[in-house]
Amino acid sequence: MRTKLSNSKQYVVLFVITSILLTMLIGCQKGANAPTDKAVVTTPSSELLISSAPSLKASLEEIKTLYNSKHPDIKITYNYGPSGAIKNQIIQGAATDVFISQGAAEMDELDQKGILKTGSRVNLLSDELVLIVNKNNTSINSFEDLTKPEVKKIGIGEAQTVPAAKIAQQTLEYLKLWDSLQTKLVVGKDLNQITAWVESGDADAGLVWDTIAMTSSKVRVAAKASADTHKPVVLPAAVVAASKSSVQASDFLKFLQSDEAMQVFQKNGFTKAK
């Protein structure tokens, strides 16, 4: 015959079963939350886009290797082009974390529009304007030689986008050669194109940065523009305010100013800005 448990005994049994279930549930939760030896904490990597003039390419590629040896989690990508063109891209909203301009005017415009991160702008480097000719050309050895009748074409950059073109004009005006050379000037989209013209003989001479001339074994520097013939050549750099990796961008810009990075720049013809 079946017997019924008294109410008090039923409560005791129910309490015991409930206690066992709660203990098992808590144990499972602790086990699920407990750290294991296989747990790995990872840090998301950051990507930086650095926009710069082509004259900095050799230096920046080497500096990327140096920086990544210390910060392997940072992916660095470069965008090279005439400083004026890059400035316009940034104004139109193109993504850029750090901008290194070949001239101050382009950076000034971004600064005035509030596009740069406050306090991030620095004068990074200086460069020199030079007159280049084909390495086999022995008749041109000064700016004044450009007036010779055998000189038909002189390469110069696009005034609106290539800062070297403005410095070239200032130099030629100072030397009182600008007006007399107008019919000989041929405009190139950038300094690499002008260098290629001189290499091939499509231009008798060209006006480029010294750091660009150093990249070619087919040209020689016929003359250097004296510092008193033009405004100072300064390469400013700054973090763009819209950068999504502002902290990392600021750190990279700081590294560009380090002695380690400056040695690379100087090896490629730049000098530290004063």
Image (spheres, helix red, strand yellow):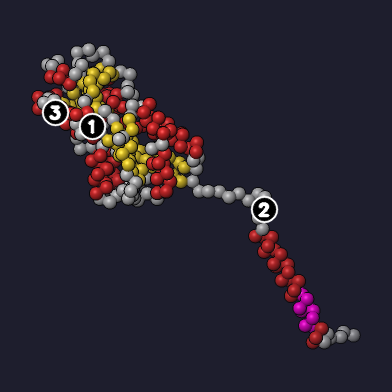
Residue for point 23% across, 34% down: 232
Q: Amino acid at mark 1?
A: Ala
| Residue 11 magenta-highlighted | yes
Outermost residue on the front side: it is: 274
Is residue 200 visible to us here?
no
Q: Amino acid at mark 3?
A: Tyr
Tell me the magenta residue range.
10-17
Of marks 1 and 3, the one in the foreground: 3
Residue for point 22% across, 28% down: 227
Outermost residue on the left side: it is: 180
| Residue 161 magenta-highlighted | no
SS type, badge 2: loop
Marks 1/3: CA distance? 15 Å
Say whether disc 1 or disc 3 marks the residue closer to the N-terminus.
Answer: 1
Name the image quarter holding the C terminus: top left
Quick one: 138 or 4, which is closer to the camera? 138
Say whether disc 1 or disc 2 marks the residue closer to the N-terminus.
Answer: 2
x and y percent of residue 265 in the render? 37, 30
Residue 117 horizontal side relative to residue 3, left or right: left
x and y percent of residue 257 in the render? 38, 37
x and y percent of residue 152 in the render? 15, 19
Q: Which mark is residue 174?
A: 3
Is residue 11 visible to us here?
yes
Marks 3/2: CA distance? 74 Å
Q: Quarter of the image holding residue 100?
A: top left
Residue beneath disc 2? 36
